[in-house]
Amino acid sequence: MASLDPRVQRAEPTLWELPDRPLEALEHWPTYEVFVQRTRGAHAQHVGSLHAPTPEMALVLAKEQYARRSQCVALWVVPTEAILWTSAEEEDLFQPATDKSYREPQGYLQSRQRIEQYRDRLKPATS
Amino acid sequence: MIEALESLVLSLADDELIMGHRLAEWIGLGPILEEDIAFASIAQDETGHAQAYYQLLTDLGLETPDRYAFHRPAERFRCAHLVELPNFDYDYGLALVRHFLYDAAEQVRLQALRAGSYDPLAGLAERLLREEKYHWMHATTWLRQLGRSTEEAHLRLRSAMQQLWPYAWMLFEPLPHEEEMVEAGWIPPSTQLRERWLELITPLLREVELEQPEPSAESLLPLQGARAGLRSPYFDALLSELTEVAASEPDAEW
């Protein structure tokens, strides 16, 4: 009997035939964006995307795709189509024209250090 | 007592080991990447479950999981013929229907064991049911999805059902020493488990128009004896492949 091991004797792959025309958008299964919630109450984080025929199948496939190597308490899937995003040409939207480093996390740390210094100055000197 | 326990645990463990092997043969051949990963992950779960079952016997002073999996003659295996069937021409409809019928049986068996009187098995069943929940979700979602899609999908599911139905039915062939197990309260009789399995799958099969009549005695006859060690014609090739590496260096430690 010939080996049934696919590594020895590969199954004849059924090749998907390309149609005689340009592919329509979404002719493949649509994609879904996947979000995982690591712990209860945490916000959901985007972890990637996948193909699936329906939202239910997307959840089933996302579980092994994105929730098997680290902690997860809930999964979200969102049709990629439902997401509106800014384009690469619009990147300059995010570039401030003036120094706004005080808004960055490092800026808040500096404010904190200044508050602490001020408090220290207010403390009565102990001898 | 120990013979009855070994008979029960090996039937569960060997089903998992061989099913895991057949599922794993799909690695790299799944219909899409996402499903390939999910199916392979299920294969890995089932193999892990087999190891956990064998370990129960090891803890009682019987053989180690590796001895059971890789150094046992074919006639000492106790799996059902359903899991031994090859993937033939790699029709995913056949793979999904087998996965559905088998994992439904797992749901029923594990829930019964969890409520049973043998604590090590009841505790293990509780643990395994956590992973089985996903297997069942995967199987039912696919069945509903394909069962309601195109005529070709339905045709493939239908022919898979017809081919596999007697084999699935025989997952519940009574086990050797079954009376003793039932009397001890470890597990209900196989016929009762089959009833529960039918209650679980019938509404789903009806929903996608794949319900099957009771198999004829004639179709079941050649499938008898699996739980007592009678292997299907496909088993030897499977076992020699499964044990190939271990046999090349029998005393190696892994």
Image: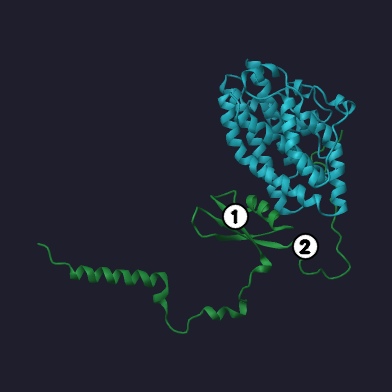
Chain colours: A green, B cyan
Residue ID at (28%, 72%): A114
Residue labelled with disc 1: A75
**Residue at x 22% of width, y 69% of height:** A119
The image position of residue B32, as x and y in percent, is 75, 54
Q: Position of residue A23 (x, y in %)?
A: 81, 68
Callouts 1 and 2 in the same chain: yes
Circles 1 and 2, Cβ within 8 Å, touching? The answer is no
Q: Which mark is residue B102?
A: none
Query: Can you see residue B16?
Result: yes
On screen, residue B244 versus residue A69, left or right, reads: right
Above or below, comparing residue A28 to residue B59 in the picture? below
Q: Regarding mark 2 in the picture, which secondary structure is present there?
A: loop
- Chain identity of mark 1: A
How far across and how far down the image is residue A44, in percent?
54, 59
Residue at image mark 2? A28
| Residue lying furthest bottom | A97
Location of residue B167 in the rendering, given as x and y in whole percent from the top left corner: 81, 32
Crowding around mark 1 (Cα neighbors within 10 Å: few <14, some 14 to 19, many 20+) is: some
Q: Amino acid at mark 1?
A: Leu
Front residue of A68 and B254? A68
- Quadrant of res A117: bottom left
User: Of helix, strand and loop, which one carries label 1?
Assistant: strand
For the residue carrying disc 2, how many other residues have a C-alpha within 10 Å: few (<14), some (14-19), or many (20+)? few
Give whichever of B247, A97 is nearer the camera.
Answer: A97
| Quadrant of the image occupied by residue B161 | top right
**Which amino acid, mark 2?**
His
Q: Nearer the viewer, residue B45 or B240?
A: B45
Nearest the viewer among B13 and B89 is B13
